Image (cartoon, rainbow, N blue to C red):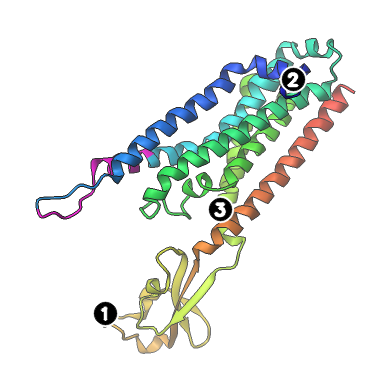
Amino acid sequence: MSTLTLKGPYWVAARQHRRVLWAVPALVAVGLVVMVALYVWSAYPTYDELHRPVRTPGEDLLRGYMQSATKSLMFLPLLVGAFVAGPMVARELESGTWRLALTQSTTAKAWLGSKVLVAAAVSVLGSLAVIGVYRLGWLRVSGTYGLRWSDGGAYEGTGTVLVAYCLLGVALGALVGQVVRRTLPAMAVTGLLTGLVLLSLRALRWSFLPVVTETAHHSVNPNSLVPPSGFVMSTGLFTTTGERKPWFECYGEPQLAGVCRDDMDVASVYAHFHPVSHYWPTQLIETSILLALAAAALYAAFRLVHKRHP
């Protein structure tokens, strides 16, 4: 058992922030209890006077809870990065207490490494637990508006990218905390940088893989070409010259069902979409990008601490 006990600067880092370390499993446990209760309640069937199944209050509460959880998940990597940058790194540099660690036969790199390792371990275990709790409720409401597999928030909360975003927050916090060396500014800058990365990759993620294209006769509604689980990127018309046009331009006024204007020269309608099979490949690509960014930020952080305190 002694080999599993934290020692040296790792014990100090865990001891300094033990309240936060205990708060993480406590919050996850509370979230799990609420999620299980709502899940069980929503699964209990309810019928009207004609014995037809109706939506239960439990389903409404579960959906509302999931919507709130989806929004909250987006702030988790920002909070992780801000905490590492501020209380764990910048505050000690600002107050000078980090010098005490250097008097205990500990190098500056070991001091920073202890902060990073403890924060990374808690972030990985905590985010995996959050994903497990989130998926429990999400599986029951995954087909509803705003909670589909491709929607922002639900996409991050059900896969590996949330773990990678938290690790990026740890790495950025370790770097920014040393550069800024002021607690509150370091927290703000790290949260901003992490948020910018999240928003940038959210805008780019659906260009990682080529879309699937389905075509049909121009009398067909292009949305019907997309499977129920598909994520529509665009729909429209192909003319005989290969030009793309919006689907609604096919019809004149008044609209004649299945009849296009003569001057349109329409060849077919098309739908570009991502099938649900693109979910995990996209997750793994985005996770790889985030881990590469985190590794680069962590390398810069250790180079900086070595340069300032060899």
Residue drawn at the location 54% of the way across and 34% of the way down: 76
Q: What is the quadrant of the C terminus in the image? A: top right
Position of residue 79 measured from the top left corner of the image (x, y, whole percent): 56, 30
Per the rendering, the mark at residue 231 is: none
Q: Amino acid at mark 2?
A: Ser
Q: Amino acid at mark 3?
A: Ala
User: Distance between the Cα atoms at labels 2 and 3?
Assistant: 47 Å
Q: Which residue is mark 2?
A: 2
Per the rendering, the mark at residue 255 is: 1
Disc 1 crowd, CA 10 A, few/some/many (<14, 14-19, 20+)? few
Q: Please tell me whether mark 1 or mark 3 is closer to you in this view.
A: 3
Q: Are marks 1 and 2 in contact (CB under 8 Å)?
A: no
Position of residue 152 measured from the top left corner of the image (x, y, whole percent): 48, 49
Q: Is residue 198 above or below residue 170?
A: below
- 119 lies left or right of 35: right
| Kind of element beneath mark 2 | helix
Disc 3 crowd, CA 10 A, few/some/many (<14, 14-19, 20+)? few
Q: Please tell me whether mark 1 or mark 2 is closer to you in this view.
A: 2
Q: Residue furthest front?
A: 1
Q: Earlier in the sequence, mark 1 or mark 2?
A: 2
- 113 lies left or right of 230: right
Q: Amino acid at mark 1?
A: Gln
Residue 53 lies in magenta, yes or no? yes
Q: Nearer the viewer, residue 9 or 155?
A: 9
User: Distance between the Cα atoms at labels 1 and 3?
Assistant: 35 Å
Q: Which residue is mark 3?
A: 203
Q: Residue furthest right?
A: 310
User: Distance between the Cα atoms at labels 1 and 2?
Assistant: 79 Å
Residue drawn at the location 47% of the way across and 54% of the way down: 149
Residue drawn at the location 66% of the way across and 28% of the way down: 119
User: What span is in magenta?
Assistant: 50-65
